[in-house]
Amino acid sequence: MNFLFDTIQFVLFLVVLTSGSVFFGGLFYKALIGERNLLSPILLKPEKFIYKIFRIDEKYEMDWKEYLKGILSFSFLSFLFVLAIQLLQQYLPLNPQNISNVEFFLAFNTAVSFMTNTNWQAYSGESTLSYFVQMIGLTVQNFVSAAIGLSVLLALIRGITIRQGKTIGNLWVDLTRSVLYVLMPLSIILAILLISQGVVQTFDSYTTVQTIEGSNQIIPLGPAASQIAIKQLGTNGGGFFGVNSAFPYENPTPFSNFLQVLSILLIPGALVFTYGKMLSNKKHAWLIFGVMMFAFCSGIIVSYWSEVSNSSTFHSSELMEGKEMRFGVFNSVLWSVATTVASNGSVNAMHSSMSSISGMVELINMQLGEIIFGGIGSGLYGMILFILLTVFISGLMVGRTPEYFGKKIEAYEIKWAIIGILIPSVVILFFTAIGVTTNVGLSSILNKGPHGLSEILYAFTSGANNNGSAFAGLNANTNFYNILIGFAMLLGRFGVIIPVLAIAGNLVKKNITPETSGTLSTNNFLFGFLLLSVIIIVGALTFFPALSIGPIIEHLLIKSGYTF
């Protein structure tokens, strides 16, 4: 009976996700290219007002280097601002609990985390950060860091679609439209729906209540719903409260749970169809969406099977440790896979308590480069890097100059694509090696054996791929991990953005050549199969040795009766 109900819920989720992606993909297309759209009567004047206040010439175009300088400078200023308000927290308003200033290295890690759209948290929100820092610092970054990713995607699309130009758009216009027309309206709607379900949104101080056992318990409050809405829609992650979406005040009902997990994938899915419209090729969009959906569903099936299989070691047919009884196994699995394919990182169950196979699925989802849906914009531009690599390899196989929508794919693009794909991988493996071979790294793990290795591998995988979730057994609030994961997040973010913009800047200079009978089709099943194969070979197999001595050997040992 549970299996039937879970299957129906999964099918319903897929139907709503697919139809929502198609619908919003069309809406985003008009808004992002500046055409009149459904929200223009409300938002056109605010958009023009923003341009006027900040003296933005919306007709001015940037080349890729100027576009990149804008991103780097804006991101650096964002980092400094979030860092400063944490270090001065106790002197700022909206701090009813009188929470003290944040320690420097933790503040550094948090500022980097939210600036890079990672939202890795080495702290518990309700005991570490004031309402002011949560709203003015973190929530604002949830909007603009997601908008940066979307802006980079738009720049890359222009590089592919513009016929022999020099510029790839205006960063400040892209940033404004991304926030105003995509992120803000959906966040307002979702926040209202979450409040209707019981998610808290208040400036009141924490409340002390008496439990039925007669002891006192502090109930944390705060303006949570507004941050939760954008953290999910912006694929930011990061909990207003320490235990994230497992906390009843952050995720109180099955409907709020459905809304939140749907919102994690909605905008990344919709942007695939926005991309198809910009290319004037819906078939290619469906192929990309199909590859993403196949990988996503495969992860769900494998994880669910692992969580409900009979275990002689644990003497249970369903693994419930670390899961909310309100949501059960399937909703925990659905969320764990959705949050790791989408670089979101929020959780409604403890990933470290999942079965070793489920933990491996979560790791692989991130290690593929966060391209199966992925972050806002970043997921799709990461997927395009793999598409360019697939086109190049396929072209060499048939003896033709590789082309992608009429643009020749040459050594320059492939070199940058490889750099963009390999940088996060190198960071993960190198930093994990440091973690598992130093006393300071090993001193933070909770479990010994292969699960302890997985805790460290998961932390750097999450950081370098800008996900933000964790195997919570690892004590990451140490100077060692705050610094090292901070640098992993920076390299994982900008080590991909820079290659993507370099590719966009080179592609935009090229003429679009007409298709011929020998042109490789990127719209058919064969190309989808090749793309999936390249993703698996280049992405997943890079980490096979590390996975072998982590979750794989852990699974085999648990089958033999050993636990960790």
Image (cartoon, rainbow, N blue to C red):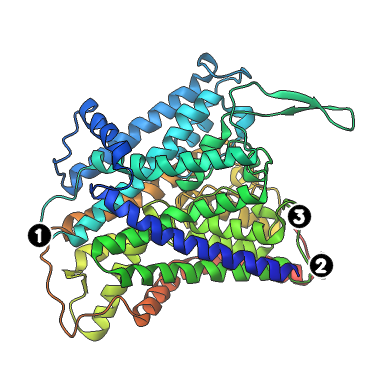
Compute the Cα span from label 1 to label 2. 63 Å
**Where does the image place residue 250, in percent across and percent down from the top left?**
63, 40
Disc 1 target residue = 164
Q: Amino acid at mark 1?
A: Gln
- Is 473 placed left or right of 325 in the picture? left
- Is 92 placed left or right of 182 in the picture? right
- Is 52 placed left or right of 92 in the picture? left
Mark 2 or mark 3: which comes first in sequence?
2
The N terminus sits in image quarter: bottom right
> In terms of depth relative to the viewer, which is nearer, 156 or 14?
14
Disc 2 target residue = 313
**Residue shown at 46% from the left, 55% from the top:** 266
Image label count: 3
- Is 300 placed left or right of 269 in the picture? right
The C terminus sits in image quarter: bottom right
Q: Are marks 1 and 3 in contact (CB under 8 Å)?
A: no
**Residue shown at 24% from the left, 85% from the top:** 398
**Where does the image place residue 21, in percent across and percent down from the top left?**
42, 59
